[in-house]
Image: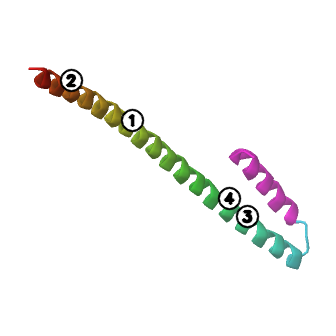
Amino acid sequence: MKDNEFQVQMHELLTQAKSLPDAEREKVEKLAIETRERHDKLRSTVANLTESLDQLRLSVKYLVFDLEATRRENQYLRNLLEQTDEK
């Protein structure tokens, strides 16, 4: 469910809850508030997770770049050693 759909449905629920008796309305409003808070917390958690994944992807790219550079350097140094051994 998209965020705007959630907000619309919450608004509809709270509007309909106004027609309930006081005791029932308070229960529904309390549950609606808790649900909204959980939804906000979940949205925040997903945003943090997405940011962490982006950081992880970037770190992996740097590691792959470093690994490739290290392999090239190793090959270059091996070639130098082979050349000096031949002399």
Q: Nearest the camera: 8 or 50?
A: 50
Cα separation, mark 1 vs mark 2, equals 23 Å
Q: Secondary structure at mark 4?
A: helix
Outermost residue on the bottom side: it is: 23
Three-letter amino acid code at disc 3?
Answer: Thr
Mark found first going from the N terminus, 2 or 4: 4
> Is label 2 in a helix, a strand or a loop?
helix
Query: Distance between the Cα atoms at labels 2 and 4?
Result: 60 Å
Q: Are marks 4 and 3 in contact (CB under 8 Å)?
A: yes
Q: CA distance from mark 2 to mark 3?
A: 65 Å
- SS label for mark 1: helix
Nearer the viewer's eye, disc 1 or disc 4?
1
Image mark for residue 39? 4
Q: Nearer the viewer, residue 44 or 31?
A: 44
Q: Amino acid at mark 1?
A: Val
The residue labelled by disc 1 is: 64
Report the side of 43 relative to 23 (left or right): left
Of mark 2 and mark 3, the one earlier in the sequence is 3
Question: Where residue 73 appears, x then y in whole percent?
Answer: 24, 30
Q: Nearer the viewer, mark 2 or mark 4?
A: 2
